[in-house]
Amino acid sequence: MSLSEKTLFISGGSRGIGLAIALRAARDGANVTIAAKTAEPHPKLPGTIYTAAQEIERAGGKALPVICDIRDEAQVAEAVAKTVETFGGIDICVNNASAIQLTGTLETDMKRYDLMHQINTRGTFLVSKMCIPHLKLAKNPHILNLAPPLDMKAKWFKNHVAYTMAKFGMSMCTLGMSAEFAKNGIAVNSLWPISTIDTAAVRNLLGGATVASMSRSPDIMADAAHAIFMRPSRQATGNFYIDEEVLRAEGVTDFSVYSPGGADQLAGDFFVPDEVFANSQTKVRRIY
């Protein structure tokens, strides 16, 4: 099985995990829409929608770069329409775009609060809403939200309640939409890493090079996402997947390829439930 000629709509896919998922699909010969805001090079962030499109084409896929702020309903509608016009439909929706700020209640200004909720929760809802009419027509439709398990412990809220609310809003989209659209055969799942992933967010906001050296590459999330997309949509829905658990279920035992730094111990990511760490065969240490 592969994603050959399948069409993916990925929000915020110009870099990091979103781009890794796009490239993994492209190696199968998939069509990929990169719907993101970065049209011009950013001084602190790698990649644009156009460089991402070039990488997708080189990897063997077809790319449609679309300038899209997922907070804007008209822009999302236009991006979805362009995707359908170009590729004939949508098979997979990946809600990857996200905003983060790890501040307490008094330190969080409302402009940033609004940004996180507009991109994370509202953006996931909106992009899914626009894609669903087309997903209903697909043979094995999937929505995948890069969102954490709903582990409702106070420790995940007390230091950054605004961010946690925004990310868990994405997770609640998974919970609700998976049930709502089960009758249509649309799989709606979340995927989250057990360890930190070496992305611009980690390097710029979440610990820099030290934490990056204890992180896995985005390829582990891409391979886990690909495995999920291969599963029958009517049977694999409403799950809060952890990347390593997905791949172990697929028979993967050697995860060293995802740790180019060769770290003996990985940094555990936010929101990973205690029981996941307890059951993991990998050395993971909580740092958040």
Image (cartoon, rainbow, N blue to C red):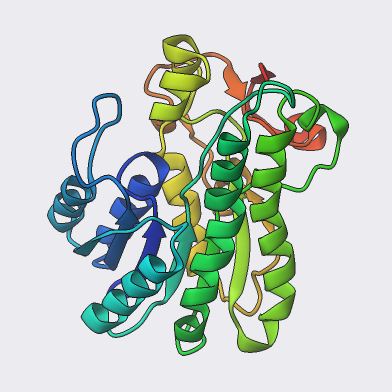
Q: Quadrant of residue 56?
A: bottom left
Say whether residue 107 is left or right of residue 17. Answer: right
Which of the image's four quarters has the C terminus?
top right
Residue appearing at x 26%, y 32% in the figure: 46
Q: In x, y percent, where is residue 261?
A: 39, 17
| Residue in front for this viewpoint, 66 or 234 | 66
Q: Visible in this render: residue 141?
A: no
For residue 137, above or below residue 204: below
Residue appearing at x 35%, y 46% in the figure: 20
Q: In x, y percent, where is residue 286?
A: 69, 19
Residue appearing at x 46%, y 49% in the figure: 97
Residue appearing at x 33%, y 58% in the figure: 68
Say whether residue 246 is left or right of residue 218. Answer: right
| Residue in front for this viewpoint, 130 or 230 | 130
Say whether residue 127 is left or right of residue 187. Answer: left
Q: In x, y percent, where is residue 232?
A: 56, 76
For residue 188, above or below residue 262: below
Say whether residue 132 is left or right of residue 269. Answer: left
| Residue in front for this viewpoint, 279 or 19 | 19
Which of the image's four quarters has the N terminus?
bottom left
